[in-house]
Amino acid sequence: MTSQVIQGYAAMAAGQRLEPYSYELPELKGHDVLVSVTHCGVCYSDIQAIDDFYEVVTYPFVPGHEVVGNVTELGPAATGLKKGDRVAIGWQGRSCGKCEWCLKGQEQLCIDVENNGVWFTHGGFAAAMVADSRFVYPVPEAMPSEHAAALMCAGLTVYSSLRAHSAGPSTKVGVIGVGGLGHLALQFGRALGCRVTAFSSSPEKEEEALGLGAEDFVRIDDRPSLKQRGDSYDLLLYTNHANVDWKYVVNLLKRRGTISMMGFPASVEFNPQELVVRELSMTGSFLGSPATMREMLSFAKAKGISPKVELMPMTEVNEAVQRVREGKARYRIVLTTF
C-alpha cells in the first residue's frame, strides 16, 4: 500500500471542539486491513476520550469506534476478508494475542488494553482507518449499515452482559437508563425471552420503552415504586452515567441477584452489608470477545434488533458530539461520510 493522506476530525487538546485534520495512514502490516468509512456512531465514550477522562489519549486525537465501511486494502497476513467487503469495527481494534486473557478467547480483557482501542491509530471520524482484520467483522446481509454501527459498542456491551449471566425466559431483568445502551438492552432482553422492566428518570420515554420490549416502566426517582418492587430482579443492567439512590436500586435485587455496571456514575454508595447478607454481586461489562461480537451480530439480524438512530453528516460532527454530551440523542447518532 502506498502512503495515503486521510481527512478526519480531531481534538487537538483535551475537551476541544474537533477540527478538520489530515494525517498519513500507517503502512499495512500483518493482519491489518484498510477500511473506507461510510458510517460511524458517536458514543459517550468518544466524548470521555475527547475530554481525556481515561488519561491515556494522545493528541491530536481522532475519535470514533462504531465504524462501518468497505475493505479497500489488506495486509500480508489478513485472512477471511476481501476487497469490497462491507465490514464493521468496534472499540477494540487489536490485542496482544499472548496474555492469559487473549489465549482464553477473552481478548477484551487483554492486559495491553490501553493500546488496543481503534482510536490509538486514529478512529472512525475520518474517511478511512486501519484495524486488525481479526477485529473486523462482516456485516450481516440486509442489515442497515447505520444499525450495524450502533451495535458495535452499545449492542455488544449489553448483549455480552446478558449472555454472561445466562439471561433467558426465567430471568427478570431491570434496565436502568433508556438511552444508547438501554434501548438496545430492552430489545436484546426481550429477544432472549426475559421479563424486562425499564427504569428511567424521563417519563416521556415510557411509551417507547414499552414498544422496545419492556413489560413495565418505573421512574428511577420514584422511591415508593422502587420499594414496592424490592426483591424482584435477577439482573440489573446499569446502562447510563447518572447518579441514582443506590439503596433503593440494590433493594430491587433478589437474593443472589447481580448488578452489571456499564456506565460510570460519579459515586456508588450503599451499605455493603446488603451484598453479604443477600449474597449479591456487582460486576462490570466491558465490550465482549470477538466470538461474542460475531454471535451478537447474527442474533441481532435473526431477532430484528433495531437501533434507534439519528443520521448526521460527518461535517456536523461537533453538533453530533454536543447532542451526545447533553444526552439529547434518540438514541444513537451515526455520522455518514457519503
Image: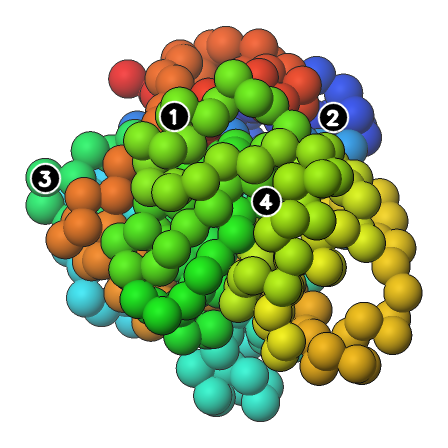
Image quarter for residue 33?
bottom left
Q: Is residue 22 above or below residue 150?
A: above
Nearest-to-viewer mark from 4 and 3: 4
What residue is shown with label 2?
A: 12
Residue at the location (27% across, 36% down)? Answer: 306
In the displayed structure image, the side of residue 95 where residue 48 appears, left or right: right
Q: Answer with mark 1 or mark 2, whichever residue precedes in sequence.
A: 2
Would you say the residues marked 4 and 3 are in contact, meaning their CB atoms lie under 8 Å apart? Answer: no
What residue is shown with label 1?
A: 208
Q: Considering the image in quadrants, where does the C terminus appear?
A: top left
Of residues 4 and 127, the one drawn nearer to the viewer in this rendering: 127
- Res. 125 mark: none
Q: CA distance from mark 4 to mark 3?
A: 31 Å
What residue is shown with label 3?
A: 142
Under mark 4, the amino acid is: Ile
Q: CA distance from mark 4 to mark 2?
A: 34 Å
Nearest-to-viewer mark from 1 and 3: 1
Q: CA distance from mark 4 to mark 1?
A: 15 Å
Can the viewer see residue 253 in this picture?
Answer: yes
Q: Answer with mark 4 or mark 3, whichever residue precedes in sequence.
A: 3
Would you say the residues marked 4 and 2 are in contact, meaning their CB atoms lie under 8 Å apart? Answer: no
Q: Is residue 174 above or below residue 326?
A: below
Q: Answer with mark 3 or mark 2, whichever residue precedes in sequence.
A: 2
What residue is shown with label 4?
A: 176
Nearest-to-viewer mark from 3 and 2: 3
Q: CA distance from mark 1 to mark 3?
A: 25 Å
Q: Answer with mark 4 or mark 2, whichever residue precedes in sequence.
A: 2
Specify the farthest residue to the left: 142
The x, y position of residue 291, in whole percent, is: 33, 71
Q: Residues within 10 Å of mark 1 (few under 14, many from 20)?
A: few
